[in-house]
Amino acid sequence: MKLLLLGPVGCGKGTQAAIISKNYNIPHISTGEIFRWNVQNNTELGQLAKPYMEKGELVPENLTFKLVSDRLSKEDCKNGFILDGYPRNLEQAKALDQIVQLDKVIMIHITEEIILERLGTRRMCSQCKQPTNIKWLVDGKCEKCGGEVYTREDDKPEVIKNRLEKQAVSKELIEFFENKGIFYTIESTNEVEKTYARIDEVIKK
Ligand code: AMP
């Protein structure tokens, strides 16, 4: 199953993609996570991507497409994958379309009010690399693996605003997938499991 999760920044894509990855045994490919790894490890790609990421802007397409196409050509993607964070615009969707045909695109719908509340309390686990929330932490550590958590640089309020503006899912992107008959929307709920159940229903359709 070749899947893509779409939705605004902070809609819970990362959390949901991780559950899909585990339940369907397919790799979770998060361009944001790969970029963050490269920044933390100070690779050449990380150095090039960092200034864009810090401002909440998209990393240029030539760097992003190479990263995605390299990752999708790996053996573990043969039986499917769940893409999270790519493609984010029409240009990227067309580029991806040249190398792979997606089965389903699922958009998580959520109000901006809830997003702002969520991003303000979001944390990342430095160990299992999954997003979490201060409400879920156990003794200040990741509730899943006990790892140390940190706040993403781009979860600062001024950057969040820029990301919401610059990275909204465009109408053209939605139409691109609608025209292929593979586009589905689900409404986010306040509970991870309930939202997942809605996504799973679409996957099983
Ligand atoms: P995310 O974790 O998906 O919110 O991504 C974090 C940051 O990585 C974004 O704000 C962008 O700077 C960069 N990034 C992730 N995915 C893409 C993409 N598809 N195209 C360009 N930049 C991206």
Image (cartoon, rainbow, N blue to C red):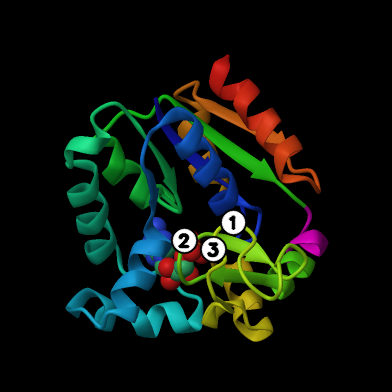
Q: Give the quadrant of ligand 1.
A: bottom left
Q: Residues within 10 Å of mark 1 (few under 14, many from 20)?
A: some
Height in image: 141 above or below 101? below
Q: Amino acid at mark 1?
A: Lys
| Residue situated furthest top in the rendering | 205
Q: Amino acid at mark 3?
A: Gln
Q: Is residue 61 left or right of residue 184?
A: left
The image position of residue 185, as x and y in percent, is 65, 33
Query: CA–CA distance between discs 2 and 1?
Result: 8 Å
Residues rendered magenta in the picture: 111-115
| The C terminus sits in image quarter | top right
Label 2 with label 1: CB-CB less than 8 Å: yes
Looking at the image, which residue is at 23% across and 65% down? 63
Sequence-earlier tag: 2 or 3: 2
The image position of residue 161, as x and y in percent, is 66, 76
Residue that mark 3 sits on: 167
Looking at the image, which residue is at 59% across and 79% down? 151
Residue that mark 2 sits on: 128
Sequence-earlier tag: 3 or 1: 1
Does the Cβ of the disc 3 residue fall within 8 Å of ligand 1? yes
Q: Assess whether residue 155 is covered by the magenta stretch.
A: no
Q: Which mark is residue 144?
A: 1
Query: CA–CA distance between discs 2 and 3?
Result: 26 Å
Magenta span dominant secondary structure: helix
